[in-house]
Amino acid sequence: MTEIGTLHYLVVAAALFIIGTIGVLTRRNVVIILMSIELILNAVNLNLVAFSRLYGLHGQVFAIFVITDAAAEAAVGLGIIIAFFRNKETVNVDEVDLLKW
Amino acid sequence: MIPVATTFFFYFLAVLAIGSAIAVITQRNPVHAALALIVTLLALAGFYLMLYAPFVAGVQIVLYAGGIMVLFLFVIMLVNLEQNIREYQFNKQWLVGTIVALALGGLLLFVYRTGRGTFPTVFYQGYRGLEGDNTQQIGLALYGQYMLPFEIASLLLLVAIVGAVVMAKKRI
């Protein structure tokens, strides 16, 4: 077995990113789509922290900023879900067609 | 450089993270998906510890697994998902979407394979010295070099709080 290098972490992060992308593209439930976005953000965070081992502390500071953004995004997104569910009584994204013509 | 990352723990956490991430996007019940996502987040916190980033690992557990996931579970309880669980879970473009995403993953792996020689093999100077005062170093960076982004982030959080209240309120 080889020693665990930066590349190993990058491959794990890429796998998480692709799984999150598949979730966003294929699921109908909007709550699960938001969870997939969290997966994508976490994959980016893993990349940042893995590179901070090579280039200094900046990657970790940026990871904290990404976590802040994820919190803001989750709060607003879940508020939108609640407002949407109140109007349409569903959480399926393909029934969100108010702005379609 | 002595690696704290033993090979066993790396592969254990990798299998845990990727397996529960797959569970997140395949589970029918959103509560199960949220619980699987918590397992992924905890595995990632383990990765951060292995990468000598204890502060980010703590923030990951407290803020992500403790804060954001509780918010998710609250919303899952608030919206009535009984009907949704019985419906078809994937949309009509699921095959195309999966193929495109996997192609993107193949592209990423190809880039890593061809470009892996360009990474520096030596770790950042004094990186091991940070394991004692990692939190202090991050605090100094946040309040020194990253002062303006820090303030912008606080403004963003304020806007997000107001926006979430306005969105979720019945009548304004």
Image: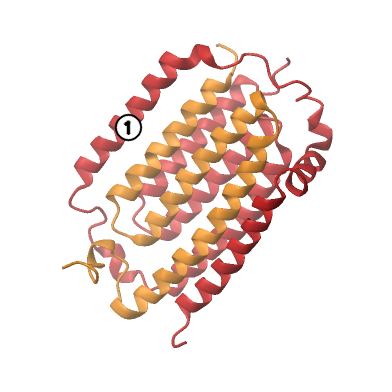
Residue at the farthest bottom position = B171
Residue A9 placed where, x, y %? 54, 27
Which residue shows up at 16% across the image and 68% down it?
A101
Write down the colour of chain A: orange
Q: Which residue is mark 1?
A: B104
Residue drawn at (52%, 31%) of the image: B14
Q: Residue at x 49, y 33 (%)?
A: A13
Q: Nearer the viewer, residue A28 or B19?
A: A28
Query: In the picture provided, is B114 more to the left or to the right than B102?
Result: right
* Quarter where residue A69 is shown: bottom right
- Image quadrant in which you'd find residue B110: top left
In the image, residue B169 lies at what x, y percent? 47, 82
Q: Is residue B26 above or below residue B67?
A: above
- Rendered colour, chain B: red
Amino acid type, residue under disc 1 in the picture? Leu
Q: Is residue B150 above or below residue A13?
A: below
State the image coordinates of residue B141 (x, y, percent, origin top left).
75, 42
Q: Quadrant of the N terminus of chain B?
A: top right
